[in-house]
Amino acid sequence: MSLALSAQDITRALTRISHEILEKNQGSANIVLLGIPTRGAHLATRISSIITSIEGSEPPTGTLDITLFRDDLRMRPPRAIMPTKIPTSGIEGKDVILVDDVLFSGRTIRAALDALGEIGRPRTVQLAALVDRGHRELPIKADFIGKNLPTSKNQSVRVLLSEIDGRDEVTIEEGAEL
Amino acid sequence: MKHLLSIADLNKSEAISILDTATELARVGDGAVKKLPTLRGRTIVNLFAEDSTRTRISFEAAAKRLSADVINFSAKGSSVSKGESLKDTAMTLQAMGADAVVIRHSASGAAQRLADSQWMSGSVINAGDGTHEHPSQALLDAFTIRKHLGMGASDLAGLNVAIVGDILHSRVARSNVLLLAMLGAKVTLVAPPTLLPVGIQNWPATVSYDFDSVIPHVDVVMMLRVQQERMSDLFFPNAREYSRYFGLNGERMASMKSGAIVMHPGPMNRGLEISAEVADSARSVITEQVTNGVSVRMAILYVLLAGGALEVGSN
């Protein structure tokens, strides 16, 4: 096991991502942050509060569960469905920023795009990920990345967040993803 | 979990996870998204060898919202009415590639027979077998109670539920007693002695013959239909007497606790076990039970069918 990001690194990365989101979208007026449960949702909340402290107004923030849209449902036991909370302002015509902890195969994001398509038609969809570990299986890339972590497929990336795990930390462990 | 045959097959955490899943799926139904791709390409057969309105339509709506293909099959108008056996019917369904069969049958244990046999490989969901069980109804009832009175808790601990009427013939009562007791509710069965089954003392519930003494203390009154089609003997002197002692009318409803709700699995005999005044009152959650039925059945189909060949634990 090796430490890839410390608590401070995570805070810095999220602060930078927040600034990049604001830069790319010329402010927070039209953006909607949607975190993918479980950890993406907490990251979206953190980015939202950083943006609030910079801009003075809070961007609409919600969660988007993609379980029912996964393409690997038949290969795994059923997973628990997490809450989907779309801000009341909706996503129609908005710049939606999807937030996830680790970008790996890209299949989660494909499912998220399908889920979004059922809800409405955003003006743009952008992707923020705390860690990009490579090994994409689909033509998907992130717009905002906390850290690129070169990994082998026999390793797994573990993200811990203080909201649920008690501390902030990203580690690389030997042994393939479960 | 492959089949849903009886509440007895579930443990408390499985039951709660179905209710939680249904809660999330209900939000889907409320929102703009009415259709999910989750069970695309799966075939679900509704095999109804006994009449049904709510359950069949509810399972059909649930399957369609999850994008499954639904084949409806009822005894009337099929080869079952020519005397085809359950085995031959099941093998036909297997040959057509059914991933799940939702079965309602007048024989108790029909769903179990189908699940234990090698006639077909899909999941079996019991949608009511004779006077045995009706697990999806119990789950939707528990879901409805939790939504109204659960105060955010995951189970039903501390709630008092009265189940009133034809317990003897009621599969809904059997499933509900098991599930509600498992979730921590205190269940009281109210019925004339003739409509209570043998062995009732072993059920996780108390029994009362006096509806009026029970009604002020309960949070939920669940009325059962008097199942005249299953009654070959005389179980009570006449309908008026039954209605006077065990029917829920406006006067009895007035003695209910504030916030207490009235439930009925349908179809109702208005004027017999429940008066129209009660059925259409603000306490009645009867139509909401139907709405919740779709979400709960979506959750059941999701839990049974969405997973693949791997069993839980091998992940």
Image: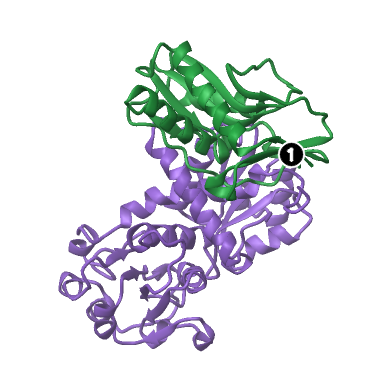
Chain colours: A green, B purple
Q: Can you say whether A68 is above or below A106 in the image?
A: below
Residue farthest to the front, as pictured: A8
The front one of B306 and B199 is: B306
Q: Which residue is drawn at 53% across and 22% down?
A: A17
Query: Taking the image as drawn, is residue B231 in sight?
Result: yes
In the picture, measured across the screen, residue A99 lies left or right of residue A71, that is left
Q: Give the residue displayed 43% in from the left and 71% down from the top.
A: B157
Q: In this view, does B159 lie to the left or right of B94?
A: left
Q: In this view, does A145 lie above or below B216?
A: above
The three-letter code of the residue at mark 1 reads Met
| Disc 1 crowd, CA 10 A, few/some/many (<14, 14-19, 20+) | some
Which image quadrant is residue B8 in? Answer: bottom right
Judge whether residue B85 can be spotted in this image: no
Figure quadrant of the C terminus of chain A = top right
Residue at numbered disc 1: A75
Q: Residue at x 52, y 34 (%)?
A: A43
Q: Where is residue A118 in the image (x, y as percent from the top left)?
A: 47, 25
Placement of the N terminus of chain A among the 4 image quadrants: top right
Q: Is residue B89 above or below residue A72?
A: below
Q: Where is residue B12 in the image (x, y as percent from the top left)?
A: 56, 66
Left or right: A22 with respect to B46?
left
Locate residue B276 relative to residue A50 in the image: left or right: left
SS for tag 1? helix
